[in-house]
Amino acid sequence: MATQFNQFTHFTRKDYQGFRSHIPKIPRLAEDDLIISDSKFSENIEDMVEKFKKTQNHPIHPKNMGIMMYHCGLNDLYEPSIFQAFERHMDLYRGKFGSRLAFGCLYGLFRTNAGTSKGIEFFKQEVLDNFDDISAREAFQLTEGLSYNKQLTTEEIHAMMDEVIKPKLLQHWHKTLQHQKKKMIRLVDFLIAMDYYDAEIWEHLLVALRSRKSLQGVDAASKLYETFSKLNEEGKVPFDLSEDVEHYKNILTTKPDNIWRYNVEEKRFYTYQELKAKRNDYPYPDQIIAPKWGKQLREEVLALKDKPYIEDEEQGLDYDRNSFEVLLQERFDMVKRGNVSELDDADTFRDSLEELGAERAEGEEALESLAEKEAEEEVTEELFGLDELQKKAKQEADQERLQQKQKEANKQNQNKGKKNK
C-alpha cells in the first residue's frame, strides 16, 4: 500500500467520496481519509493552502483539516497562519476526527513546527481516544515527525514517545516492523535525533538488525558501523554497543568486496582514485566465475571464430539449438557485435547450458509435441498459403451475407402475399 500511497500527489476541495470510483483496483486506498483526488477538480497542496487563506475565519471540516495538515507535513510547508486557524476551530469537532485524521493532524504539527502546544495536546488526546486503530505505519510516521520537532522540549518529546508511540511500535514490532530493514535503519536515525534511548525499544531494534542477513552489503553495514561506533565513543547511550560495533566491523572486514571498497580504520569509503590505483589487487573468491571455466570457455570461443554468423532466428531453427556449440557460437557472435560484455559471466553461462540439458532430458516428450505442432502449422501454410486462407474466409462471409438477404426477401414476399389475400 505504501507504493500505491505515494503515487497520489494531487488533492481537491471536493469530498473524497466522489474519488472512489476512479480507483476500484485499490479499495483500501479508496477508503483513506487522507488521500483525496478528482480528475476534474485536481489541485496540489499549495493551491489548497492559498485558497483556504482567503476563508480561514470560517470553520473547516475535520476531513479537510486532516488532509491539509498531513500533506503540509509531507511537503515541508511551513504555514503557521493556517495551523493556528485550524486550532481555533478544532474544539467544534472534538471526538469526530477518528484515528486516521487525528494521526494526520498530529503528524503535521510534529513535522512542520507550525502549530502550538495546545494543538499538539488536543490531537494527542484524539489519537489516544482512537489508539486501537493506529497502525504500525502511522506509529513509524509519528516517530519521524516527532524527530523533526523543535517546539517541544526533550523531556516532552520523551514523554510523547512513552505515552503515544512506544506502545504501538512494540505492539507491531514482531508482526511488521522487524521485517522492514529500511524502516529500522531510519528508526535508528529518528531515535538518535530525539536522544531517545529507551532500553526496550533499542533491544528489539539491535537484535533485529543483527539477525538480518540482507544487511551484509557495504552501504548498510558501513552506516550502522559508523553510527554505533560514534554512539559508543561519545557514551550517550545507557547500554553497551560493543557487540554491534564488532558485528558490523566483521562484515566489513571479511567480505572481499567490502574490504576493497571501505576503509574500516578511517571509517570511510575509498575514493575513485584509490580504487583505480589498486584495481589489480582485487580478490576474486566471492565471484561467480571459476578459473577453470574461464580458460576452457575462451578456448572454445576461439575455436568458433572461423564459423559463419548466425544471421537470424530462421537459420538457427535449421539445426539443434540446444547443443553447446550452437549456444556458444551465438554468445560469441553477441560479444563480437558488442551486445554483451567480453567479461560476461562464463560460469553462469555454463550452468545455464547444464540446466538446459537436464530440462531437455526431463521434458523430451513436451519438446517433441511442440515440434509436431509447429510442423503441422508449417504444412498448413505451405499447402494453402496465407492468401488462400484469406480468400476462403472472405468467400464464406460473402456467401453468408447473400443467404441472409435471400431470407429477408422471401419473408417480404410472404408478407405481401398475405396482404393480397
Image (cartoon, rainbow, N blue to C red):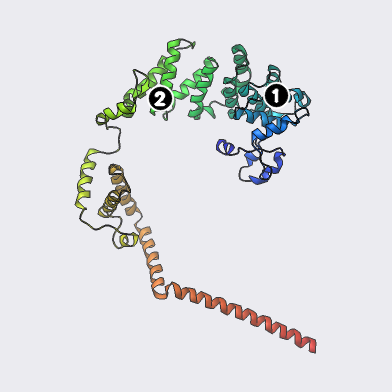
Examine the image and state in which quarter residue 363 appears.
bottom left
Q: For the residue labelled by badge 1, is the local secondary structure a helix, a strand or a loop? A: helix
Q: Residues within 10 Å of mark 2 (few under 14, many from 20)?
A: many
Of 317 and 306, the residue lying toward us:
306
Q: For the residue labelled by badge 2, is the local secondary structure a helix, a strand or a loop? A: helix
Q: Residues within 10 Å of mark 1 (few under 14, many from 20)?
A: few
Q: Residue tagged by mark 2?
A: 221
Residue found 19% across the figure and 47% down from its top = 299
Of 42 and 264, the residue lying toward us:
42
Of 251 and 4, the residue lying toward us:
4
Residue 259 visible in image: yes
Residue found 63% across the figure and 29% down from its top = 72
Mark in the foreground, 1 or 2: 1
Say which amino acid is labelled 1: Ser
Residue found 71% across the figure and 33% down from its top = 51
Horizontal side of residue 316 vs 131, given as left or right: left
Which quarter of the image is occupied by the N terminus?
top right
Residue found 38% across the figure and 27% down from its top = 218
Q: Earlier in the sequence, mark 1 or mark 2?
A: 1
Q: Residue 403: percent from the left, percent from the top?
A: 61, 80
Q: Residue 143: percent from the left, percent from the top?
A: 58, 22
Residue 81 marker = 1
Say which amino acid is labelled 2: Ala
Examine the image and state in which quarter residue 84 appears.
top right
